[in-house]
Amino acid sequence: MNVDELRYRIALTFIPGIGNILAKNLISYCGTSEAVFKEKKKALMKIPGIGFKNAMAVLDSTALEKAESEIEFIREYNITSLFYLDKDYPQRLRNCEDGPILLFYKGNVDLNTHRVISVVGTRNATHYGKGFLEKFVSDIAEFDLTLISGLAYGIDVFAHKMAVKNGIPTLGILGHGLDFLYPTQHSKLAKKIITHGGLISEYPSLTSPDRENFPKRNRIIAGMCDAVIVVETKERGGSMITAEIANSYNRDVFAVPGRIDDEYSSGCNRLLKNNKASMLESAHDLAYLMGWEQNKKSPGKQIKLLLNLTSNEKKIVDYLQNSSGEHIDRISLATQLSVSQTASVLLNLELSNVVKCLPGKQYLLV
């Protein structure tokens, strides 16, 4: 990618009043990031959600000037920028309407691996929560997955440590820029994480770890995964926010149950009581409910010749030919159909007894 295009992409994130949804809308109407900044004021004002004030903000040169400084920073520290239309951008997150248009990434693993889980929980992790995580992460390692968390105190940092210990790629999602680390006590672990996964932020350099950044950060944790695991939490807090967001994104949510009088199990128990999470007692539970333990079917399974498939149905059937189960998001990505189109086609194929729906929104040929 040329420097000019990168400058325009970064500049979009610096325009006051233009969030991720409006920025995507601007690109949709104008065609490219560069075209957004070169559009006439009258044309910008006609774009839904823009108006006079936002149009003037787009035409202000300040955002482009800030972008120049950011380019220097990411080059100096070997940081990768991922635009939401790039193939390397986390595709699960791309399907979330409010997903960031740009991510800053320092690491070395594929962000679109076959299986991704997020682990969240209280900053005041107990022996019970740590004990569960130690065994869970060790047991789940055989399923070739990536583990995401927020590198905060407590459950987050312990999940990262267990991932590194068990050779599982792990990603830390930050609520500030990549020019420093908060909390600083986790800097040594962060260096290990970069070699075993990576650090990701939607925030440019010089962004402080302000309180309001972390609930926004949580939507990335929820959006980048197939399932969110809530280990310990009170009834209010960041982990409950992440679980709610995950449910809104149609992600699977799991909660580790605890005693009814334990303060840091009250949130998990509430999620279970309200049917907003499935009970998780072991790695086996997760693997079973996500359909990861399904036996592989024989490759190249043939579909009845008399079956009349539409072009979209054929795309999905062809993709599933040599699969032992694929998540709907990966099917959508591979076939270049929207998630809603994919869901509709899969339903028709399921009704025709061509595909079977497994737990965890996984599909395979019958």
Image (cartoon, grey):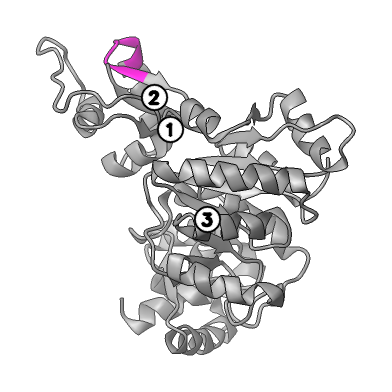
Residue 233, given in percent of the width and then of the height, sits at: 78, 44
**Mark 1 highlights which residue?**
340
**Above-or-below relation of 34 to 49:** below
Residue 351 among magenta residues:
yes
Q: Which amino acid does label 3 sit on?
A: Ala
Return the residue at label 2.
344
Q: Distance between the residues labelled 2 and 1?
A: 6 Å
Split into 4 quadrants, where in the image is the N terminus?
bottom left
Task: Residue 310: give x, y in percent of width and height.
Answer: 21, 23
Instruction: Specify which label sits upstream in the sequence, 2 or 3.
Output: 3
Residue 54 lies in the magenta-colored region = no
State left or right for residue 51 relative to residue 337: right
The amino acid marked with disc number 1 is Ser
Eyeballing the image, is 131 above or below 151?
above
Q: Can residue 177 be seen in this view?
A: no
What residue is drawn where x is 47% and y is 83%? 74
| Label of residue 289 in the image | none
Is residue 132 left or right of 87 when viewed as pictured? Answer: right
Residue labelled with disc 3: 163
Residue appearing at x 27%, y 39% in the figure: 335
Cα distance between the residues tagged 2 and 3: 36 Å
Q: Is disc 3 placed on a helix, strand or loop? A: helix
Mark 3 vs 1, N-terminal side: 3
Which element carries disc 1, helix, strand or loop?
helix
Range drawn in magenta: 350-356
Nearest-to-viewer mark from 3 and 1? 3
Please rate how many residues cluster around mark 2, counting C-alpha atoms within 10 Å: few if below 14, some from 14 to 19, many from 20: few
Mark 2 vs mark 3, foreground winner is 3
Q: Nearer the viewer, residue 226 or 1?
A: 226
